[in-house]
Amino acid sequence: MSLDDEWITEICEDGGSAFALKGQGKLFEQQSAFQKVEVFETETYGRLMLIDGCTMVSTRDNFLYHEMMSHPVLFSHRAPRRVAIIGGGDCGTLREVLKHPEVEKAIQIDIDEVVTRAAELHFPELCESNGDPRAELMFIDGIQWMKDVSPGLLDVIIVDSTDPKGPGEVLFSPEFYSACHRALDEGGLIVQQSESPLIHMAILERMYRSLQAARFADARTLFFPQPIYPTGWWSATIGAKNTRLGDFRESDVATKAFETLYYNAQIHRAAFAEPEFFRKARRGWPV
Ligand code: SAM
């Protein structure tokens, strides 16, 4: 990431591309035991958080990511009561999960407390549900927590992690998916941010193969825009422990008592429509 006196630039090496926002000064910087966390004010996207120079969340467009990381998987589960979020330190996904009245417990496990403290200071709107009695925030390695959790304890796991490098790499491993499979109850679902379909098809294929190796019965990818991430076109992949994916609680979406800015039943259906190149590549993948 380079910062001249005006522009905040994220260089995406594997995409051979860069993304920049016009900056208006740095608000926060801290090197934690795991990563470097920075927050900037920008001219048109509100506040912007970077972790190790990678864009994480902005005031302006985070609704796309946080809504699509939570509502499709929760409405695809028949009764999501017990939810674990691995990562998610900015707390935006936790806020969306807790909008669902049937959720009785939402545990967020992020390895780095600095991310959450920075979000509390500079993205307070994302942290507005942190005091919900159903919420529990923990600061340990997600894979260790998942290995220790009792079998069948969870209905939905949301892996809102950084990219598959640094502390986030382990969250894309077969070992982690096996721990998730064991932690999920019958009918359980996992969703993980699965990078950009335009430049990260190898990561997506590895995820499908790892989900299959961990004995997940089905997997589907949903696609959505996310301007601040490399290519601006992002994805999340859902794995089903022992059920088939496809149906969702459409009437519950239509009658939901909470507001969204992007997600609705039409977006839910459209997000799972597979681009032709993905559909063809997907035929060779397991699950
Ligand atoms: N939306 C972002 C994206 O798609 O890149 C992710 C947002 S969130 C800030 C990513 C979080 O994953 C960070 O807070 C980071 O600390 C956390 N994380 C990385 N590795 C982790 C691990 N092994 N266990 C738990 N949390 C982890």
Image: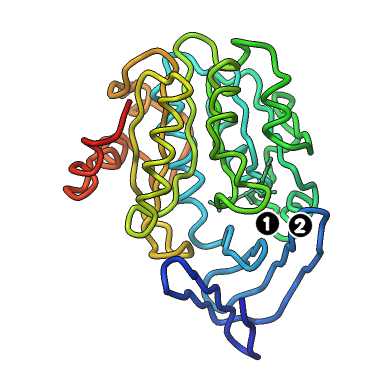
State yes or no: discs 1 and 2 in contact (Cβ < 8 Å).
Answer: yes
Instruction: Establish whether ligand 1 lies closer than 8 Å to the Cβ of label 2.
Output: no
Give the percent coordinates (x, y) of residue 257: 46, 29
Q: On the rendered structure, is 154 left or right of 244? A: right
Q: How is the image coloured?
A: rainbow
Q: Is residue 248 above or below residue 129?
A: above
Farthest residue, direction bottom: 5
User: Mark 1: which secondary structure?
Assistant: loop
Instruction: Establish whether ligand 1 lies closer than 8 Å to the Cβ of label 1.
Output: no
Instruction: Tell me which numbered mark, 1 or 2, is placed earlier along the sequence.
Output: 2
Give the percent coordinates (x, y) of residue 32: 82, 57
Q: What amino acid is labelled 1 in the image? A: Phe
Circle 2 residue: 118
**Residue sitting at x 57%, y 64%:** 55
Give the percent coordinates (x, y) of residue 208: 39, 34
Give the percent coordinates (x, y) of residue 14: 45, 66
Circle 1 residue: 123
User: Mark 2: which secondary structure?
Assistant: helix
The image quadrant of residue 24 is bottom right
**Residue sitting at x 31%, y 17%:** 244
Q: What amino acid is labelled 2 in the image? A: Ala
Camera-nearest label, 1 or 2:
2
Task: Give 230 or 178, whichever is nearer the viewer.
Answer: 178
